[in-house]
Image (cartoon, helix red, strand yellow):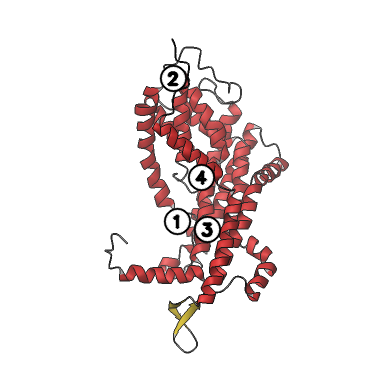
Amino acid sequence: MTDTSHPQPSEMTGVLAWIERSGNRLPDPVFIFLYCIAGVVAISVIAALAGVSALHPTQVDAAGNALVVSAESLLSAANVQKLLVEMPATFAGFHPLGYVLVVMLGAGVAERSGLFASAMSSAVSRAPSLLLTPAVAFIGMVGNLAADAAYVVLIPLAGVIFAAAGRHPIAGIAAAFAGVSGGFSANILPGQLDALLFGITEAAAETILPTWDANIAGNAYFIIAMTFVFLPVIWYVTDKIIEPHLAPIIPGEAESSTAGIIKGPDTSLTQGEIQGLKRAGMACLGIVALWVFLCVGPGTPLINEDANPEARLNPLYQSLVAGFFILFLAAGWAYGSASGSINNHRDVVRMMSESMSDLSYYLVLAFAAAHFVAMFNWSNLGLIFAIKGAAVLEGSSLPDSIL
C-alpha cells in the first residue's frame, strides 16, 4: 500500500519555518523606530532622575574643567518644545533623506529609460558558458545600482539564459537572486544604499563630534572587497550544491513565461538600444572627465587648497552624491534619446517624478528614523554611552588587534 501522507519536514526546513514565522511577527520597521523612541524616552527620564553623567574627554567649561555631560529627560519642557517646534526641521535635516532623494532622481531616469535593463541583458547574454554562474552573480551585485530593476530583469533573465545553455533555469534564478539580494552590500561602485548608510553614519557620528563629515565613498573599500568574497561563494554553491540536487530538465519544459517581456539570449538588442548603450557610455566618460577637470582645472572647485592635506579632498568626497545624480541622469537621458524611450524633456521629468513616488514608504520610514536619531541626541545618552564605553575599553587592556 502506498503511503500518501505528507513527508515530515526536515530539521533544516523546520528551522527555516521558525525563522519565517519569527520574521513575520516583527512589526513594521516604522513602528520599530516608534517603539525605540518610546524606549529612549523612558531611559532618558530614568537616567535624568538618577543623575547619570560623564566627563567629556576633549571639551571644557568656562572654568577650564572637563565639561560635564548630563542625561536629559525627553519629557522636560525644553525637549517637548523642541520636538513640536522643530519637527519639520528635524525631518528635513535628516541626512539620509536628502542623499537618497538626490541619487534616486538620477537613477530613476536611468532605470525607467531602460538603460539598466539593456545593460544587464547585454552583459549576461554574452557571458561564456563556463563563466555563466559568476557572470550572473557579478552582474547581480553590480545591478544593485539599478535598485528594483535588478530583481525584475536579471532574475528571470538568468533562468532564460541557463535554460538556453542546457542548464537548469532554477540554478540561474538562484545565482541571480544570491547576487542581487545576498550581495546587496557588495559592488564596485557606490550607489543608493551607500547614500543611505553614510547619511545614517554621519548622523550617528555627529552625536559625538558635530563637525564630523562622511562621504558616499567611505565604504568603497568594503563593498569592493565583498564583491570578490561573495563571487566565488555564489559560484561554488550554485554549481556544486544547488544544481546537482535539481532534477534534470526535460527538453521543452523550460519554456519561459517571460518571453516577450525579458530579452532572451537569442533576442538581440535593437539598433536604437545598442546606440543608446554607446551614448550612455560616452556620457559616463564625459561626467568622469568633468569631475577630473573640476579637481585639476583652474580654481580647483572640488579641491580645498587652503585646508590641511588630509582635508583637501573633502569637497570632492562631498560632491559625490551630486556626481552620481548627474552620472545616472546623463547616462539615462543619453540612452533614452537614442533608444526612443525619451522623446523630450517632459519624459525626463516624468521619470524623475515616478522615481520619487517609489520612495513614498521610505519617506514615512525616514520621518520615524529622523526623530529617533534626533531625540537620542537630545537626551545625551549616545554621548554618555560612548564616553563610558570608551573608558571601559581603555581599562580592559585588550590588545590593539582585538580592539
> On the rendered structure, is 244 left or right of 74?
left
Q: For marks 1 and 2, give the CA distance.
A: 40 Å
Q: Which residue is mark 2?
A: 165
Q: From this viewpoint, which residue is outermost toward the front? A: 1
Helix, strand or loop at disc 2? loop
In this rendering, the answer to whether 49 lies above or below 162 is below
Where does residue 200 sit, x and y in percent of width and height?
A: 52, 58
Q: Amino acid at mark 3?
A: Ile
Q: Which residue is mark 3?
A: 200
Judged by depth in the image, the label closer to the viewer, 1 or 4, is 1
Q: Amino acid at mark 2?
A: Ala
Q: From this viewpoint, which residue is outermost toward the right? A: 346
Judged by depth in the image, the label closer to the viewer, 4 or 2, is 2
Q: Amino acid at mark 1?
A: Gly
At horizontal 62% and vertical 50% (from top left) the residue drawn is 362
Helix, strand or loop at disc 4? helix
Instruction: Answer few, some or many: residues within 10 Å of disc 3's Cα (few below 14, many 20 plus, some between 14 and 19).
Output: many
State the mark number for residue 106. none
Q: Earlier in the sequence, mark 4 or mark 3?
A: 3
In this rendering, the answer to whether 290 lies above or below 108 is below
Q: Earlier in the sequence, mark 4 or mark 2?
A: 2
Helix, strand or loop at disc 3? helix
Q: Tell me if I can see residue 379 in this picture.
A: no
Judged by depth in the image, the label closer to the viewer, 3 or 1, is 3
Quarter of the C terminus within the rendering: bottom left
Q: For marks 4 and 2, give the CA distance.
A: 34 Å
Q: Amino acid at mark 4?
A: Leu
Total numbered circles: 4
> On the rendered structure, is 113 left or right of 184?
right
Q: Which residue is mark 4?
A: 285
Q: Which residue is mark 1?
A: 218
